[in-house]
Amino acid sequence: MKIAVIGTGYVGLVTGTCFAESGNDVSCVDIDQTKIDRLRNGEVPIYEPGLGELIERNIAAGRLHFTADAVSAVPSAQLVYLAVGTPMSETGAADLSALWGVVDSIAPLLNENAIVVTKSTVPVGTNAAIYARLKEHTGRECRVASNPEFLKEGAAIDDFMKPDRVVVGVRSSEDSKVLAELYGPFLRTDKPFLSMSPESAEMTKYVANAMLATKISFINEMASLCAKMEANIDDVRRGIGHDSRIGFAFLFPGVGYGGSCFPKDVRALEHMAKNRGIDPEILQAVDEVNRKQKTVVPQLIAKYFDNNLADKKIAVWGLAFKPKTDDIREAPALVLIDHLLEGGCQIVVHDPEAMENVCEVYGDRLTYSDRLLDALDGADALAVMTEWGEFRTPDLAEMRARMKTPVIFDGRNVFNCDQMRSAGFSYYSIGRPRV
Ligand SMILES: NC(=O)c1ccc[n+]([C@@H]2O[C@H](COP(=O)([O-])OP(=O)(O)OC[C@H]3O[C@@H](n4cnc5c(N)ncnc54)[C@H](O)[C@@H]3O)[C@@H](O)[C@H]2O)c1
């Protein structure tokens, strides 16, 4: 099939590349000319394991193209995927300005049979509104469909290539058939292709993210309770996780969820509920627990130093909102950095992939260490804010030798308490006894 993907960010780039990999002819469109130039020169603007090789292969095969000009991509496309950002607005609602800009600009370019498919996460009712807007522009009944995306950054290629399920929201069985054919190569292991109304598909995406965010806030609240009751959240997790009704997934205590999806999608769903006269009590609690959780490590550090942070040198390992991505949107590490800067700390940061993005925000207010252990030289304390694999088994004796004082605030429970005790560290973690 000939496909145009509008918006070449985390989702658009992965979507376009994976559709090309399964044999389609895909043009990825973005208004950011620099991004398009970089992609054309073989550079991948985001860090996502495995993505670079796939892009290279599909460009070479002549199936994947990048352009800033929708006119060269949309008129011949059978499917026009919308994958632009839908960030949080000041009210908490999703900001759809980029999406409407795209809908207006592609309307005169669409061929009569094209299906406009929304991949962006959009409030319930948006597909119906896109249909109405396209009709206004073209005078025709245009075909529109919803196809929410469930990939995880850091494992995006695998998630896209081997999805647990594909959800589409359509108005006709004909559109469902086209999308089922498109996804056929990705569903060879009998995973379900779920066809429903656009409203249900839009809602499915929000409910999935709200459920996952709820699990995280729930375990974090339980971890705070454990910390006050001499219980250990690791043991409690094991104690509940083996119950098949509960399980282990997404029940890891930490410094709160971040990223470009959970925070904004929980807020957007809250906003949709309020607009319809429903008080979203669970969603509000999930959001509030998460906001507080992001301040747990800053508070532990302030308490440890008796609120006297001036000139303390703090090393921060991990800046991305989760491992295997360079994405720092709503990352808990940024909340910590803001607190430490306010307290007058010197901050040395290390992250395997996200330092460039953090440098764009903080510039020379931070010191950037390319090497993990170098960040510790002369540090009064270390805070661990992302659970990158390479943080898990460092040389503890060398860490201790490099630090001025051996104090660790582990916001992701990457270290083992016994290990920390025998290595002589003062060690604070989430929901486990202090060492
Ligand atoms: N990032 C994720 O893990 C993820 C997962 C599932 C769903 N989503 C949803 O997918 C959507 C996209 O998210 P993302 O993380 O890829 O966003 P992003 O910010 O990384 O990318 C959006 C891209 O759209 C481009 N763009 C904006 N206006 C445009 C226009 N008029 N024409 C062409 N391009 C334009 C931007 O330049 C940018 O490259 C959002 O709705 C998000 O909620 C994201």
Image: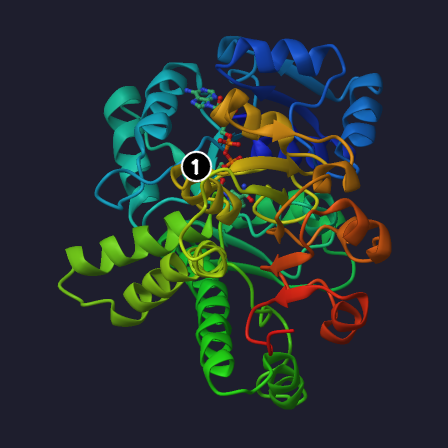
Q: Is residue 283 above or below residue 37?
A: below
Q: Is residue 81 above or below residue 139?
A: below
- Residue sitting at 46 percent across and 63 percent down? 213
- Residue sitting at 50 percent across and 67 percent down? 216
Q: Which residue is mark 1?
A: 344
The quarter of the picture where the C terminus appears is: bottom right
- Residue sitting at 35 percent across and 42 percent down? 127
Q: Is residue 333 left or right of residue 284?
A: right
Name the kind of residue labelled 1 in the image. Answer: Gly
Is residue 23 visible in the rendered image? The answer is: no
Using the image as rendered, state which of residue 163 and residue 320 is in the foreground.
320
Using the image as rendered, state which of residue 26 and residue 293 is in the foreground.
293
Residue 206 percent coordinates (x, y): 41, 57
The quarter of the picture where the N terminus appears is: top right
How is colour applied across the structure in the image? rainbow
Using the image as rendered, state which of residue 7 and residue 327 is in the foreground.
327
Q: Is residue 144 left or right of residue 55?
A: left
Check disc 1 and report its element: helix, strand or loop. loop
Q: Is residue 387 left or right of residue 313?
A: right
Residue 279 percent coordinates (x, y): 18, 68
